[in-house]
Amino acid sequence: MMRKLTPIIIGIVLLMSTALVYGQHGYVKGHAASIYGDIKYGPGFKHFDYVNPDAPKGGMVRLASIGTFDSLNPFILKGIPAAGMGLVFDTLTVQSDDEPFTEYGLLAETIEIPGDRSWVKYTLRREARWHDGTPVTPEDVIFSFKTLVERGHPFYRSYYTDVEDVVKVGPREVKFIFKKGSNPELPLIVGQLPVFSKAYYRKHPFDKTSLDPPLGSGPYRVVDVKPGRSITYERVKDYWGKDIPVNRGRYNFDRIRYEYYRDETVALEAFKAGEYDFRLEHIAKVWATAYKGPNFDRGYIIKEELPNENPTGMQAFVFNTRREIFKDRRVRWALNYCFDFEWMNKTLFYNAYTRTKSYFSNSELASRGLPGPDELKLLEPFRDKLPPEVFTKEYNPPKTDGSGNIRQNLRKALSLLREAGWVLKEGKLVNAKTGKQFKFEILLVSPSMERVAMPFVKNLEKIGIKAEVRVVDSSQYVNRLNNYDFDMTSVVWPQSLSPGNEQRDYWSSKAADTPGTRNLAGIKDPVVDALIEKIIQAPDR
């Protein structure tokens, strides 16, 4: 799933009258499943604590999305899907927002897991219905799983790779059988499966882009589509699940509309003019300087800063190591010396940022110091395949004094580049064998990232490297990333409190060779592959 190791306890409870029922040898059955200790909301709970069960229904909320869209199918590689399509489809289970990782039944009335976690069985709710009034069936669940794995986005094939089979075992029961030694989180992972109507997709191709509103079972349906400009969802008044505990107090707006804008700058000005209702800001300078104007002065727009206690993952400029110039580790490390984070943080970011040192930033799983005893147990079998500094030096990116003068770092960069076969001639860094200049392109989708990339580019110029920044529209950007047609780009890797199957999509050798994965860096390393499997199969955090 999407940190230091702490015990995991699987907790399952069963709603049978008002009692909890536990079986022998760890077998449990109930309305919810938890990875981390006790389940907060027991049998018979009325609603999640963080919702208002009496919230009035009505009105419309307007939201923003950047770029464009040409499809209402978010589950395939082709096309750019419209924002918000998850509102149309229900899943077997739903996660509570005030627990690290607990899933409660949505389409599923009960969740059943044996002590060895070798399978999970879901009993579907009798009342679960598609928007056309027909029931949601085990056949729909089986069809959804097999369709995603066989014809969906490559991510799903990787994410569900440890599922051996899925079978119908009763009129409302469906069972997922797992491969031996699989991820102990799989019973919860498969609960996140979006479920489609088998009958609908008998008549409509699943693996093609389409702007036809699909049949769903979720709280909203698509009612208006202006291709590339906006999409509007309408609350389903007779939604089958509106009164079940996990949904009470949620989905209160009658309509949700996403307006599309060319880039963040245009979207911000539209927000300040009152064209949409809610916005999250992720650029420190914009937060500090741009949220001003008449609507702020009049109190029409409320600006509020909230602490973020969730894992932030990592944002970085990514080397595409499929490119020959980036295959040498010394080259990549040399270019790190040209990135002056301290100057940027002071000059561009109002000292609002902290340098990323881990893929699991802002969490207890972030790397710190030298490998500890438990980490060494994992690393020792691969000592001869790993750089010695993994065991002897704490990872720290190059630093500067923030003055903008990074001559010492540039000298270190040139030294590493010479070791890797690059020499400085007449102001150009060239390959000692071929004489070709070191040059590459930085691919961006947001113009706001140019101000971050350009100081980096100027520092690269000082050591003879020609780097060009190219900003493209969202359609081109997605297509080029899906096909790994870039040299370097800026990417955010999100992480969760419970890393698992998705790590294959981020870092595995198989993902590196599969179009459309999140292994943009092209990492192909047997040690990384082995450690990913250790993460996935770990019995605890």
Image (spheres, rainbow, N blue to C red):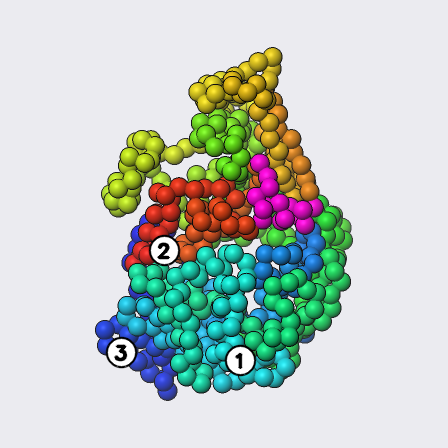
Q: Quadrant of the C terminus?
A: bottom left
Contact between marks 3 and 1 (CB within 8 A): the answer is: no
Q: Are marks 2 and 1 in contact (CB under 8 Å)?
A: no
Kind of residue indicated by mark 3: Gly
At mark 1, the secondary structure is loop
Q: Quadrant of residue 181?
A: bottom left
Q: Which residue is mark 1?
A: 136
The tag earlier along the polypeptide, 2 or 1, is 1
In the rendered structure, the answer to whether residue 446 lies left or right of residue 537 reads right
- Compute the Cα span from label 2 to label 1: 31 Å
Q: Residue furthest bottom?
A: 17
Report, in whole angstroms, how far the alpha carbon at label 3 lies from the one at label 1: 29 Å
Disc 2: which residue: 536
- Residue at figure coordinates x 65%, y 31% from the top left: 468
Instruction: Tell me the kind of residue under disc 1.
Output: Val
What residue did someone put label 3 on?
23
Residue 18, given in percent of the width and then of the height, sits at 36, 84
- Mark 3 element type: loop
Question: Viewer-proximal residue, 144 or 403?
Answer: 144
Q: Residue furthest top?
A: 426
Element assignment for label 2 = helix
